[in-house]
Amino acid sequence: MSSQPSSLNRIVTALFLAAILVAVSLPSSSTLEPGDTQWLYLSCINIIGLVVLFTLSRKISWHKNKLTKYFFLSFLGFLFFSCLSLITAINVPEGVLAIAKVATTLATITIIYGLAQLQSTSLIKTVAPLLAIYILFLAIPVIWIFLKDPTIARSTALLAPAKLNFGNRNITAAVLTCCIPFCYYGLGISYNRARWLFKILYGTGLILGLTAVFFIASRTSFVSLITLGFIAIISAMYQAHKTKFSKPQLLKRLAVIITVPCILLFLVLQTNKITPDTPNTISQLLITPETTKDVQQPSLTNDEVGNDNARLMFYKIALDDFKQNPILGVGAGNWKLSDKTKFYKTFNRNTILNPQRVHNDFLQVLAEIGVFGFLCFVGLFTILFLTIIRLIKSEDETGLGFLLLAGLSVYAIDALLNFPMERPQLQVFFGLLSAMVLGGVTLSRKRKKEHFISTQTSLAVLGTVCLLLLGATYVDYLKFEDSRNDRYVHSDYKFKDFLNGDKFTLSYDAASQLLDGYFDINGDGTAHDHILGMYAMSEEKMDRALYHFDKSIKVAPYGYNSHMLKAIIYKDKKVNLDSAVYYAKEGVAHRPSLRNNYTVLLNTYKLQKDTLNYLSTSEKYLEYYPSDVNVWRQRALQTLSKTKDFTKTLEIINSGLKANPKNPVLSNLEELVISKKPGAVVKRTNQQRLNLALGYAKQRKYILANKELALILENDPNHYLALFNLGFNASRQNLHQEAIAYYTRAIATGQYKDGIAEYNRGLAYERLGLKEKAAQDYRKSKSLGYRVAQRLPASKLNPN
């Protein structure tokens, strides 16, 4: 075994690390999700890395220590229980895919750890400059999005390109946040050559990385940055106490830690202002309006809190799943298929949404793999943090220990609030941090004793990892191929409403060939058979559609999308109302916000004259769709017909009016019901009567209109609007003498000051042939500024 590795070993390590960073940053190769491409790339690079390790195996000194052994045993235990959980899995292919990701992560850790054994010093001098360059690669395009025109208002549309090749801007922010501690630590590394060049690299990476994270403003990353700040302050104070450097030096370091991020944040708040001439607030960064038109800052009761509430609901569902399956869980990768009825009952949008992740990796592991797999998973973090504490306490590795504490804390925070296990970029960082933590102990040059495992044992370990990786790569390839086909089909059906006549470009047969792969579910959680059922429906192949929907229900029994479409087929095509009601009721019970289920039920109950079920279903429907005036109207009429209860009917109408203020349909219905109520006297305000009269007049129902206007005059004899409209109605019926009388009374009230009443009385006089009187009114109207009178010819103003 070589005790003095050459610089070639460091180059090999640097090349491998650079390769995996590039692999997980490349754009999607026509797959539905970028990760489906990047996981395959990562697996392929890992195969090359294993080949390198096999080649250099005799040169590697595999150090033996308990914590490293326990870490890998814990990881193998996690992998074992993941495999065992397939016994209870709803869908095995999804479980196999999740296990493949775990195996790929294990391979990444093993390779980096093995390459670390080739280094004569800590891996940090190889990793830090690579990550500083990586930050520049990510941060510069992100910052340019905002600074190319800093006057554009901040909006989610402006933020969208910040996802880069990761598919989500939160991933970009998380990756940048993981890199930032390495740049900060790198500023303190001593280099024999090009020292200032490295300082500039790290300083630039730190500033641009922080700026980019502030621009993206992911809430998780903000929490991580605050945590990094605390760790940096504690590190500075601890090392000041340990090395006894002066108080001014400590204050200088603390000032840099606090002021640099604050200055950068201040500058970010000055750009892309949502409200002109007013700097953005931090809450506006974290909760960005949807569009530039929405300049009103959303309150914390809107979408963002909704997302947080959804997370809490996901946590409850995950705990329920664990309670039902405490030993093996619901199956690796299968939480996405578990029952989400609790969530759907709080979800009030008419859209198909399939929550796939708990947004907490610890709870997701607990729910999917059970208690033993969860303990192994938690054990990984426990071992890493214990090892870091040992490094911090050591004489030579304190700074490295704090760096790794910062990096692992960022990952742990993301694991508590998101799902880094699904994201190859963050799994690369977990692998890198794990290898550095474990290598930080074994590579200390101050060790008094060195223990190594034999070459045969190391080759056996590498062989096992290689077999796991080859299997994972094959699974990743299958997913890659399926995802490419998914994207092609997805782009065809996603934005088309085939139920309302939109046509698919692909035929049913073409879609069937594309979706005939190993996996049953696409990237957004929709079963392939559900999609094929839609294509069959669009071509009127109803039996085939029902066949696919039945398979879809078996693959994803808690989705209830297919139940809805089966209900539609049975109501409209097969005319089996009992089946239609059954499947629609299943949908309403578990996904109560989907409108089509109610449409099937309400229409069916109307056909069956089942008033009681109509009333109970419409009540639930209106909780989600209170703006549907027609259902409010039908519900009120059905209630009146069934119960003859006028009070109850009016309560329903009033509820509808609260949801739809001043709606004419419901207002008229209310008046109609009141008028038919035994012994009732219709009471209306003058304004209500005036509005009703104007409506009648538009329909040329002058008798009804004048009746309402006369009732107004009974309450108020000088109501100028009623007088004017009585005159106007009389003119339209050629009753000009009557019109003149009403106009004269309206003018006498003194309320008309714009000349309109004089002008209309002048018209009446003119039509009676009284031109002089007409001219007097026209001149008066013109002097008062009435616009139409200004255009009158001189012959009408002065007829003589």
Image: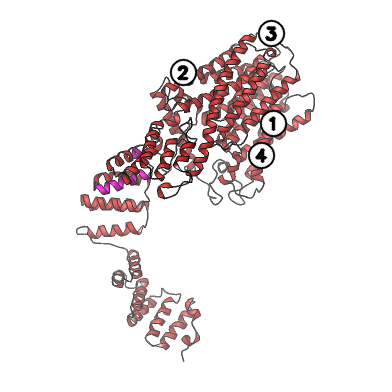
Q: Give the range drawn in magenta.
A: 586-609
Front residue of this view, candidates 78 and 35 = 35
Residue identified by numbered label 3 = 448
The local crowd at label 3, few if under 14, some if 14 to 19, many if 20 or more residues have their Cα within 10 Å, is few
Quarter of the image where one finds residue 532: top left
Dot 4 or dot 3: first in sequence order is 4
Distance between the alpha carbons at the discs numbered 4 and 2: 45 Å
At label 3, which amino acid type do we have? Lys
Residue 382 against residue 719 in the figure, above or below? above
Tell me if residue 591 can be seen.
no
* Contact check, label 1 and label 2, Cβ < 8 Å: no
Please give left or right for residue 250 compared with residue 521 in the image: right
**Residue 47 image offset from top left, x and y in percent:** 62, 23
**Nearer the viewer's eye, disc 4 or disc 1?**
1
Residue 178's tag is none
Please give left or right for residue 228 compared with residue 740 in the image: right
Local SS, label 2: helix
Residue identified by numbered label 4 = 264
**Residue 271 image offset from top left, x and y in percent:** 64, 46
At label 4, which amino acid type do we have? Leu
At label 2, which amino acid type do we have? Phe
* Contact check, label 2 and label 3, Cβ < 8 Å: no
Distance between the alpha carbons at the discs numbered 3 and 1: 34 Å
Residue identified by numbered label 2 = 372
**Nearer the viewer's eye, disc 4 or disc 3?**
3
Residue 162: say if magenta: no
Dot 4 or dot 1: first in sequence order is 1
Local SS, label 1: helix
Residue 603: say if magenta: yes
Residue identified by numbered label 1 = 132
